[in-house]
DNA sequence: TTGTAAGCGTTATCAA
DNA sequence: TTGATAACGCTTACAA
């Protein structure tokens, strides 16, 4: 909008210089003498001048925005990541656009970039169709696409992620140290990249401790939700022989599991120890509070954003290349106990 | 970005018409003959033409985006509202920009609009400084500002909100019907508009039932968080005489309260009934599951977005004016029980 | 160090 | 119903 604001021409007149000088004073102060710089700045504040982004973007052949693609905006898991991203771009003059890949047609999606609405993308959705990714690649340089949290296998886009495998290993070790030997796992949705990493970590840790992987205790959540955990609980109570501990691929699964186990008379941690993954805020206040692997979601967002800014500004610093792994930390709470 | 895409001129050549005709065929099809329209459309798909938003926005003196102002992106409460908003704008050709008012300087904030980055704003933050609001008003027409969920008192901006007062009344009635007479309240942060509405509803309902408002049982949460609830629990256990039921201004407060009460040996609902406000997903799976007033957060977002679109397109339909109240619904679960 | 002037890709006005 | 053409407000060669 901005009805009839002062334009660069007005500032130029007020400062007694040309529009080119105003432009330079504002975006390339080094190219301008101290004296005229001051004059311009004064004129800017006098006139109340604000740059017109549309004009600037048109001229510079850019969009002035980055696009964040989320698999499900309604899922609170992503809000901290988004917050981290936002905190970085708040001080830049790039706007941040968001789009939910869930309810979105593919062509609509790449249309976002084709319309030159965004200069770069941060993708939080590992399930983004390859076709869409290809479309994106046609429109933005490959290193203007960054994955955060999730990623896409067999692609080389820069990616920021938690140490999912390491987290799973910590979880199993914790249970092992508490004396548990019969350890089960509730995995995430089959096709999700995180599911595989956490499952791999689980298997690796179990093997490392020479523990048997009982297939009966390897459950599959349809997703990472509370409901998936609750469903798993129903299977578990029916088992002839139950594991004494379970590592869940997400906090929501763990919480849903505990909720349903409670209903069915199984006590956590007395009868069964539970470990989650994420460390949602509620997990520390659940009854019992949840032992879990903490992911620093804000940091994931911040890192993705700074990586992207690095690429956009042409700085290909070593740190902004390839895969950036963020450490996770096991938080020991009440849902796990020593095996009696 | 969009390196060297086809432009309207290319389409014009391909279709054998002028650029003006292409423009019209695309944005005002009625002004163009069926025949040329087809020719243009064909040329568009042949060339793979995509409009350049920056150019369009510059020419039309618009931003092509709406800005959503959230008080705290990290707070999952807002994600469903955002999701509702997004779902509406996904099919429009307006982009949605987000900004966190928490970490943001005021001038930075109104800068968003002054820079002509957004044509309109949806504000989810009732605590937005009046100065900022005034700044916004200078830049966009007043009806291009819509409040959702929260609002600002003594202003006339269109606003979409839940029936907070009605919800509080339902909550008290539920407790009353269960036989409770000693009912306490944990309010939200003192200056928040929702706090006041829910508190008013609480008082009104209590008065309606001729129940005493015991000041000892009227607590104040510093915010709507788990921690606020946990703090309140500490006060409550110290009380000589405790209420038998408590209505909390948010689910998080209620959950934090239950968590801490549990630690201190008070059983919900046997010793005390608890009602929340929001109906977060986790609330149905907490132990015990939480009786609460359900807010339709997605609908709040959808309504705010459609209202705004109505204003933007100049349609001042009756429904898009003033305050739109969204019904809430009491969900009866395990955290409330008949007084023994 | 500064100014001139030519675009960036659209849309809207005016004529035809 | 269509076409020329002048903006929209900025940046950046190129000159001075």
Image: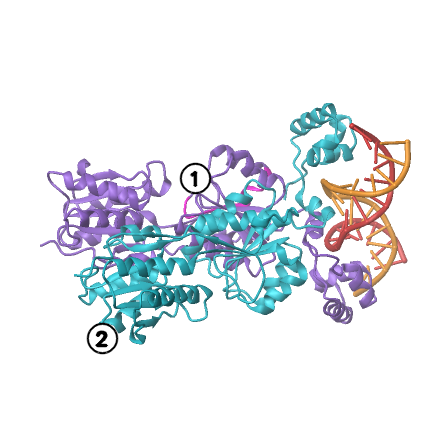
Chain colours: A cyan, B purple, C red, D orange
Determine which residue is flagged by label 1. B152
- Which quadrant does the C terminus of chain B fall into? bottom left
Q: Which residue is mark 2?
A: A238
Residue B227 lies, in percent from the top left, at: 29, 43
Which residue reaches farthest top? A35
In the rendered structure, does residue A248 fall within the stretch colored magenta?
Answer: no
Q: Give the answer, above or below, for where A13 lies relative to B5.
A: above
Q: Name the residue: 15% across, 52% down.
A: B267
The structure residue drawn at horizontal position 42% and vertical position 71%, both measured from the top left corner, is: A190
State which mark lies toward you, 2 or 1.
2
Report the number of numbered marks: 2
Nearest the eye: B162 or A211: A211
| Measured Cα–Cα span from mark 2 to mark 1 | 54 Å
Q: Is residue A50 above or below residue A281?
A: above
Residues at circles 2 and 1 in contact by the CB criterion of under 8 Å? no
Q: Which residues are magenta?
A: B139-150
Q: Nearer the viewer, residue A182 or B131?
A: A182
Residue D5, image x, y percentages = 86, 50
Q: Residue B130, can we see it? A: yes
Chain under label 1?
B
């Amino acid at each position: 909008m901005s009805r009839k604001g002062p334009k660069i021409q007005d500032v130029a007149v007020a400062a007694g210089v040309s529009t080119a000088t105003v432009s330079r004073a504002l975006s390339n102060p080094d190219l301008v003498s101290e004296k005229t710089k001051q004059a311009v700045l004064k004129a800017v504040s006098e006139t109340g001048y604000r740059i017109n982004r549309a004009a600037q973007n048109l001229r510079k052949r850019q969009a002035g925005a980055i696009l964040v693609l989320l698999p499900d905006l309604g899922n609170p898991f992503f809000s901290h990541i988004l917050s981290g991203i936002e905190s970085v771009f708040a001080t830049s003059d790039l706007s941040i656009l968001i789009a939910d890949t869930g309810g979105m047609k593919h062509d609509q999606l790449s249309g976002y970039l084709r319309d030159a609405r965004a200069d770069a993308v941060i993708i939080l959705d590992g399930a983004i169709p390859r076709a869409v990714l290809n479309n994106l690649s046609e429109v933005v340089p490959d290193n203007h696409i960054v994955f955060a949290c999730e990623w896409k296998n067999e692609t080389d886009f820069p990616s920021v992620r938690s140490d999912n495998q390491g987290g799973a290993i910590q979880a199993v070790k914790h249970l092992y140290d508490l004396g548990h030997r019969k350890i089960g796992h509730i995995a995430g949705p089959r096709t999700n990249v995180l599911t595989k990493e956490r499952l791999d970590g689980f298997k690796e840790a179990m093997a490392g401790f020479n523990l048997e992987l009982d297939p009966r205790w390897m459950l599959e959540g349809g997703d990472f939700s509370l409901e998936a955990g609750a469903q798993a609980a129903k299977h578990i109570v029916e088992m002839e022989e139950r594991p004494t501990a379970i590592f869940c691929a997400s906090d929501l699964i763990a919480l849903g599991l505990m909720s349903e186990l409670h209903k069915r008379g199984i006590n956590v941690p007395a009868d069964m120890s539970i470990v989650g993954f994420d460390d949602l805020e509620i997990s520390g206040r659940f009854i019992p509070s949840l032992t879990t692997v903490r992911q620093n979601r804000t940091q994931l967002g911040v890192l993705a954003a700074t990586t992207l800014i690095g690429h956009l500004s042409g700085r290909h610093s070593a740190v902004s290349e390839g895969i950036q792994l963020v450490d996770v930390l096991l938080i020991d709470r009440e849902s796990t106990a020593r095996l009696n």
